[in-house]
Each structure stands twice: as structure tokens, then as C-alpha cells.
Amino acid sequence: GSSEMRVMGFLDDDERLHGQLMMGQPVYSPAEIEALVEKHELTDVLLAIPSASRKRRTQILELIRPLGVAIRTVPGVDDVARGRVRTSDLRELDIDDLLGREAVAPDESLLDRNIRGKTVLVSGAGGSIGSELCRQILGCAPTALLLVDCSEPALYSIHHELDARARQTEEKVALVPLLASVLDEARIRSILSAWKPDTIYHAAAYKHVPLVEHNPIEGVRNNVFGTLALAQLASEAEVSDFVLISTDKAVRPTNVMGTTKRLAEQILQAISQTSQSTHYSMVRFGNVLGSSGSVVPLFRKQIAAGGPITITHPEITRYFMTIPEAAQLVIQAGAMGKGGEVFVLDMGEPVKIVDLARMMVELSGLTLTEADKGEGDIELSFVGLRPGEKLYEELLIGNSPEATSHPRIMRANEHFLPWGELRLRLDEMQAAMDRGDVAAVVDLLKIVVPEYTPDQHLVDWVHMKGAARR
């Protein structure tokens, strides 16, 4: 088909315009949309309201969603009217448009405190959260931004993007791509002594629940011992602030990944009592929209392929936040840290994944096959919970969270083992890892993180293969 669109009319909230012609086409009230879709057999509704409040956009979407037309957003209305917009200029509706909420304006002094005029290091700089942290940090005028990642393609990609942006905006910042693993102590020590960062954001971790269930020792090595090594070297190098990116999966964890993150938190809580020079803090949040492995890009692919959409369970819910909002809150929370705090981001309301899928399907102008509604364009398929997966995520452990000076940032009070005791357990864990003794590693995780309740047997691929041979 042609990639030009024919405009049949305009919708506007302004009553004075109703009935007028605009560039030869009538202007209607949004209330008339249903009748218009039927009469003209419309296929697409284009939103050209960049300035509308999120609340108003949500109302408009609610009005149009059930009508079976595709909804997309466009640059500006003038281009559309002149027939200049090709379908390639249309943006898929950002899922932020659906689930996002009014962002709270950031506290500029908190954003600047650990960044402006400073040397900042981000580990895992090429990851979903790490790369967004880098984008936001770049906007806060650091002197140098050290991008640390062990994945060459990820590092190349974020460096390339930031470099182009720094040139455009003529930011005078040294962008330094450093191939390094946080587990390589000699390499990290040389980076810290050469560049002397003031602030470290530690976002390097293995995060995919099923993958870490199948490779538990590597999960512990990276998430626990990587954090331990970087935290100790930061103290040694007198880095002033160290912020760990954590997760709500660390709360009463049912899987190895969440448990390793809870243990990483405990390490920082304990070290922070012994360290004079470095403030350690941790920031926990739930799923972010559009990060690798999140459902949104997956559903998008599945819808484009004509279905089916796979969901683990009809009742499963998740909290969602956009990556930019999460990164901005991480920077602000980290700036509040005096030492050893666990901050928790307010994730808003939990979303049923089925509803999210339905929304995305309807926004593509298609319908979902549902028991009570008969045949649709896209099938839903329920595939069962995966190892270590929960139906509902809890955002907080234990002691009641306290408010902070920021409406979306709370502080949780978490118990932890004192450093002397924790260190001994970590030595035992290291020894068990060296022996390749998965069962012993998992038992030690249960001791150090007593709220860890594994919901299944060991599924370590190497362990299972070895056991099958014996």
C-alpha cells in the first residue's frame, strides 16, 4: 500500500473550532470519534498533542482504544494536514504513554550533588539501566564519565551514542570507555588510581531470573563478589559516593538472582559501618519498561508477528516505571545517602500483565482473542510461571519504610550481619564456589539471607549434567 495517508478530519478539545474547516477538512469533537470510525471506516488515529498533560492523553486513549483503530503519535499537526507525514514518521505509541505517570520534577540540587564538575564511573554502563544513567549523568555536566563494561558491543554502543550527543551539545566532558570486569581487581584498581572517580554507580550485574537459576555460581560471582570487590576498592581509593543499583526482587527472594542482590546490599550496609571515606547507598526498584528482557519489547515483537502473545499466568502483576524516571530517581536517592541506606523507589500501582498485553494489542488496532469476546486477531497463550518467578512482587522488606525529602523515594530499614561475621560467610562461599559445590553455595545463601525461600530444586545446568552421569 502507499505510505501516504488520507486525512478525513481533525478532533479537537476546543469547542470554538468544532464545525470549522481546517485545511479543507472538518474539525470534530472527540465525543464523535466512534461514529466517525464507523462512517469513514477509519484505520488510524494520529495523536499530535505533545503538550497535553499525561492525564488528558490517557483519557483520549481510553476513548479510542476500544474502537479497533491503530493509534500512533506524530510530530506536529501542520505536517499531517499538508500530507507531508509518511507512515515512517509515525512513532509507535510509547508504552510510557499508557503506564507512565506524571513525572515528579527532579530536585536539581540532588541531581548535581555527586555529578557536576566531578569524575563519575558507571559499571555496567552498556546495560539497560547503566546506559540510561550515563545519558542522565552526561546532562549534569561531569568533568569525566568513565564507562566500565565487560561487553564490548554494549560498551561500543553507549560510547558511540554519548560521544555523538556530547559533540552536538558541545559538552566539555571526557568520555572514557573502559573494557573491564568488576571481578578483575587489578584492572579496577588501576582505573580507580588513574582516574580517581568521586562517584561510582554500580549497575553491573546478572539480572535475568531464569538464567541465574541455571547458572547460580556465576550469578553469585558477579553480583555478590563483583560488588564486594568494587566496594572495597572504592573505599581504598577514597571514592566519596558509591551507589548500588538493586531490585525489588531482593525482597523476600524466591530466586538466586534476588538473593544475590540482597546479599550485595548487606555487603554495602556492613562495609559502610567500617568505611570512613566512602558513603554507600543502595536503590531498589521494580521492572523498568523497555529494558532488555522486559515484556514490552517482547509483546511488540509478538504482535508484529501476528501472535501469539505469551504470558506466564493470567493473574501475574508487575510494577513498572520508565527507564529515564528510574535513572533520575537513582541519582537523586544516591545523593541523599549518608551511609548504608537502602532506598526504595515508589513504583506506582502494579499492572496486570494481561491488561498490558490487551492495551498494546488494541493500540495496534487489533483485537485479542478472549473467552468471553470470541475470535480476535491475536491469541493469548499462558505458559506457566518460570523457575523462581513470583505472581506478585513485594516492594519492601520488613521494617516500615520512612519518607525522605522526595515524594517518590523512601528509605527501608534492613537488618544485616556485622562485617566481621559476614566476611567469614563470604570466605566459606568463595571456597564452595572454587570447589564448584553449587549445593553448598545455595545453603550459604540461605544462611546469610534467611528470608530466601527457593521455590524449587537446583536447576544448575552443569550440576544437573554431572548428576545425570553419576
Image: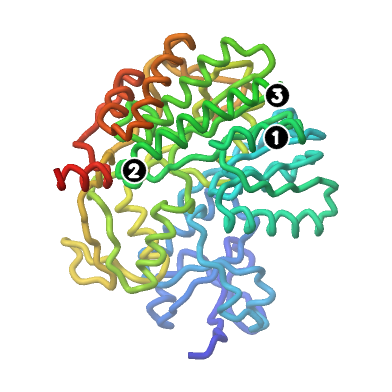
Q: Identify the residue under disc 1.
A: 190
Amino acid type for the residue under numbered disc 1: Ser
The residue at 43%/83% (across/down) is: 40
Q: Is residue 94 left or right of residue 395?
A: right
Residue 379 shows in this picture: yes
Residue occupying the far bottom of the picture: 1
Q: Position of residue 179 (x, y in %)?
A: 63, 48
User: Residue drawn 25% across and 47% down?
Assistant: 386
The x and y percentages for residue 71 are 47, 68
Label at residue 215: 2
* 139 to 81, vertically: above or below: above
Q: Could you tell me the amino acid type at mark 2?
A: Asn
Amino acid on which disc 3 is placed:
Ala
Residue that mark 3 sits on? 237
Q: SS at mark 1?
A: helix
Closer to the chain start, of discs 2 and 1, is 1
Q: Secondary structure at mark 3?
A: loop
Q: Which quarter of the figure has residue 122?
A: top right
